[in-house]
Amino acid sequence: MLEKTGIPTKEDIKSITPSEERRRKGPVAVIECFQKIPCNPCYTSCKFGAIKEFKDINDRPVVDFDKCTGCGVCVVNCPGLAIFIIDETYSDTEALVKIPYEFIPLPEEGSYVTALNREGKPVCRAKVVKVQNAKSQDRTPVVSLAVPKEYSMEVRFFNINDYFSDNTYICRCEELTLGELRELIRMGYRTLDEIKRISRAGMGPCQGRTCRQLIMQELAKTTGQKMEEMPMTTFRPPVKAIKLGALAGGDDNE
């Protein structure tokens, strides 16, 4: 799969993930280098011996998590931008993910961005805590993002635009914004049907095909519900847009 899509498998990710016990101790490096290539700057740059010695220049790097301090020196020395620092001790609910970022413009500290997973899909809203761009980093800035702790091993990049701001439209048909949805949830609306009845989200021309999943994601994130256990809304025909001629029993082209 990696050769075809560039996306590692779950088994690949599991093989490089620090144990939960280690993640509770503090920042640690995660090296997502899944192919054998002649490259070892991570090994030569580590002053703590946390990256095990290569027997061959083509070996994949292996981290000794007990020796790793999460200093981040290896992050800026990796030419493939394949090393990240995760710190699940950042706060009770959030983890810090340090990401190498060789694009301009750099995000501003304190701003919010859209955190992406390895497939480039939006995962959550993230706050830019710090942007490191010293001369010693050899033009590889490192951006520290605060993300919900459960996403520490998912978030690996970001879009500088904040798709999760309160002004983002969740339901375009009925013009429901994310801020309005969050307010409804704070008011006690906890199911798709409740939100549909109070806001009309899902009652427009697309019948919820766009907004339903987004509302479920926000409910899951805010209330702790599991998406697969959420009751679905009531579907009423027509479940997709059709022509009046079809309803009248005429030709599809009428």
Image (cartoon, grey):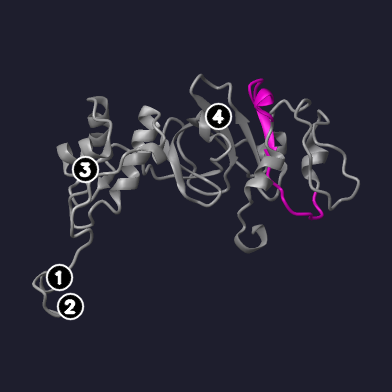
**SS class, disc 4:** strand
The three-letter amino acid code for the residue at tag 2 is: Asp
Q: Residue under label 2, please give it.
A: 252
Q: Quick one: label 1 or label 2, which is nearer the N terminus? A: 1
Q: Quick one: label 4 or label 1, which is nearer the N terminus? A: 4
Q: Is residue 138 magenta?
A: no
Q: Residue under label 1, please give it.
A: 243
Relative horizontal placement of residue 181, taking residue 81 as reference (left or right): left
Q: CA distance from mark 4 to mark 1?
A: 51 Å
The three-letter amino acid code for the residue at tag 4 is: Leu
Q: CA distance from mark 4 to mark 3?
A: 31 Å
**SS class, disc 1:** loop
Q: Quick one: label 4 or label 3, which is nearer the N terminus? A: 4
Q: Residue drawn at (15%, 36%), measured in percent from left and top?
A: 198
Q: Nearer the viewer, mark 4 or mark 1?
A: 1
Q: Nearer the viewer, mark 1 or mark 3?
A: 1
Q: Which residues are magenta?
A: 19-39
The three-letter amino acid code for the residue at tag 1 is: Lys
Between 16 and 213, the one nearer to me in the picture = 213
Q: Residue under label 3, please give it.
A: 176
The numbered disc on residue 38 is: none
Q: CA distance from mark 3 to mark 2?
A: 32 Å
Instruction: Please say if the residues under marks 1 and 2 sit with CB atoms less than 8 Å apart.
Output: yes
